C-alpha cells in the first residue's frame, strides 16, 4: 500500500509553493496585551500562562509561530481538527482574538525539556535528521529545521515539545483521526510505534 502513495517529497514541494498564501494577513495588527488577557482567562489552565504547559498531554505554545496557532484555532472552530475541549474553546473566538492570543504565545520563551527516555535519543535523531530511506520517510528537519524551529507561515516549531503530545499527534495522524495535514498523514502512515516514540523523544530534547 505504501508504494502506491504519492512521494512525500513531492507533497512537501507542492505545499512549499502554496503555503505562503495560506496565511495571508487581513491587514489588522495583533495586540499581544489583549492576547495575554485571554490567555489568563481561558488558555493558561492547559497551556500555561507563559505558553509552557505543565501537563504533557497539552502542547506547549511558547515560541510557536503565530500563523500556525491561528490556523489550528480556525480548524478547531470549523471542526476540521477535532478535539472536544479545543473545539469548545475556539468556538467563541473572533479572528482578532485568535491573532492576539497567537501573537502573545509566540513572544514567550520556550523552556528546554531534555529527554524523558535518553535511550531513544539516537534512534530518534537518525529519523529526525536523516529520515528512513527504506520506507520513504523524509527527514523531519526538512520541514521543521535542525533545531525544531520550523518555518514561519509553513511548518510549526517542534523543538522542546512534550514527547507524549508529539507521540499522540503522530499516532492520530497515522490512524486518520487527525487529518488536517496531508504531509503528516502520509509520513505518520510509514512509521512504526517504536519509530514514533523515538522521534518524539528526540523532538522533546531539541532546543
Image (tube, rainbow, N blue to C red):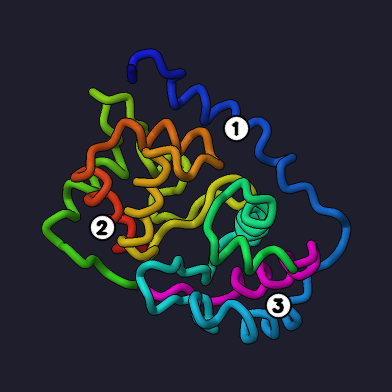
Whether residue 177 sits left or right of residue 166 in the image: it is right
Mark found first going from the N terminus, 3 or 1? 1
Secondary structure under the numbered disc 1 in the rendered image: helix
**Labelled disc at residue 163:** none
Secondary structure under the numbered disc 3 in the rendered image: helix
123 drawn magenta: no
Q: Residue at x 35, y 65 (%)?
A: 162
- The spot of residue 79 in percent (x, y) is 63, 50
Whether residue 68 sits left or right of residue 171 in the image: it is right
Whether residue 125 sits left or right of residue 184 in the image: it is left
Residue beneath disc 2 = 201
Mark 3 vs mark 1, CA separation in Å? 29 Å
Residue beneath disc 3 = 35
Q: What is the magenta segment's predominant secondary structure? A: helix
Q: Which residues are magenta?
A: 93-112
- The spot of residue 28 in percent (x, y) is 86, 63
Mark 2 touching mark 3, by CB under 8 A? no
Residue beneath disc 1 = 15
Q: Quadrant of residue 136?
A: top left
106 drawn magenta: yes
Q: Residue at x 17, y 46 (%)?
A: 123
Tell which of 92 and 4 is nearer to you.
92
Amino acid at each position: 500500500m505504501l508504494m502506491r502513495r504519492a512521494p512525500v517529497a513531492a507533497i512537501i514541494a507542492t505545499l512549499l509553493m502554496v503555503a505562503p498564501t495560506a496565511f495571508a494577513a487581513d491587514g489588522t495588527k495583533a495586540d499581544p496585551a489583549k492576547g495575554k488577557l485571554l490567555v489568563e482567562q481561558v488558555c493558561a489552565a492547559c497551556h500555561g500562562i507563559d505558553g509552557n504547559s505543565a501537563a504533557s498531554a497539552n502542547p506547549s505554545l511558547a515560541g510557536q509561530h503565530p500563523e500556525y496557532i491561528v490556523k489550528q484555532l480556525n480548524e478547531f472552530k470549523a471542526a476540521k481538527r477535532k478535539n472536544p475541549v479545543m473545539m469548545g474553546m475556539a468556538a467563541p473566538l473572533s479572528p482578532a482574538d485568535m491573532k492576539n492570543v497567537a501573537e502573545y504565545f509566540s513572544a514567550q520563551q520556550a523552556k528546554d525539556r531534555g529527554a524523558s527516555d535518553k535511550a531513544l535519543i539516537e534512534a530518534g535523531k537518525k529519523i529526525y535528521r536523516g529520515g528512513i530511506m527504506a520506507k520513504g520517510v523524509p527527514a523531519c528537519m526538512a520541514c521543521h529545521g535542525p533545531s525544531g524551529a520550523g518555518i514561519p507561515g509553513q511548518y510549526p516549531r517542534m523543538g522542546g515539545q512534550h514527547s507524549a503530545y508529539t507521540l499522540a499527534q503522530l499516532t492520530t495522524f497515522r490512524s486518520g483521526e487527525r487529518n488536517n495535514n496531508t504531509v503528516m498523514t502520509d509520513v505518520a502512515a510509514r512509521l512504526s510505534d517504536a519509530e514514533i516514540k523515538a522521534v518524539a523523544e528526540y523532538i522533546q530534547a531539541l532546543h
